[in-house]
Image: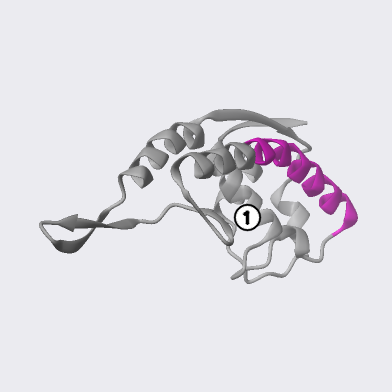
């Protein structure tokens, strides 16, 4: 087993690289040998616990700083205010408060333990994807 220290922000990025995004398929979708897929799945499980905690806290923060609408809560970037009889758009101070509370959480360092994964494990994998943090933090660990 290997151990790496990652910030919550890095954990979120590695998760996106593993499972994919709207624009790119994830590492877990690549054709590869089953031992590598097993090890990657163990890594995914290890970071999933941290992501669940982050998501729960983030929902609470959206409820605290946001406005409820038909699709849940959102924090508008700008708000309309009356400035001497004129409607003016101003930066939403609640968004700044949200980020002031969120940033320390994103910088929090977590120790993640996972099975050894090497670059050789990907010798037969074909991808056009770009997984910079995975290669920097996980393969180099």
Horizontal side of residue 66 vs 87, given as left or right: right
* Residue shown at the point (69%, 54%) measured from the top left: 18
Vertical side of 28 occupied by 9: above or below: above
Along the viewing direction, whichever of 102 and 44 lies nearer the viewer: 102
According to the picture, the residue beneath numbered tag 1 turns out to be 16
Magenta stretch: includes residue 40: yes
Q: Main secondary structure of the magenta part?
A: helix
Give left or right: position of 141 versus 31.
Answer: left
The residue that appears at 63% across and 39% down in the rendered structure is: 56
Q: Residue at x 38, y 36 (%)?
A: 100
Is 140 placed above or below 87 here? above
Numbered disc 1: secondary structure:
helix
Q: In the picture, residue 112 is in which quadrant? A: top right
* Image point (45%, 31%), residue name: 104
Is the residue 28 above or below the residue 93 in the image?
below
130 or 13: nearer the viewer: 13
Q: Which residues are magenta?
A: 33-53
């Amino acid at each position: 087993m290997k151990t790496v220290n990652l910030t919550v922000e890095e954990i979120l990025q590695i998760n996106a690289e593993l499972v994919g995004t709207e624009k790119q398929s994830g590492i877990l979708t690549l054709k590869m040998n089953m031992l590598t897929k097993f090890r990657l799945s163990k890594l995914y499980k290890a970071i999933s616990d941290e992501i669940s905690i982050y998501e729960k806290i983030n929902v609470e923060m959206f409820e605290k700083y946001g406005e409820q609408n038909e699709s849940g809560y959102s924090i508008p970037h700008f708000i309309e205010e009356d400035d001497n009889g004129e409607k003016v758009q101003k930066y939403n101070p609640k968004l700044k408060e949200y980020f002031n509370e969120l940033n320390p959480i994103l910088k929090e360092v977590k120790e993640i333990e996972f099975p050894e994964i090497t670059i050789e494990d990907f010798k037969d994998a074909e991808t056009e994807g770009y997984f910079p943090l995975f290669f920097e933090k996980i393969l180099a660990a």
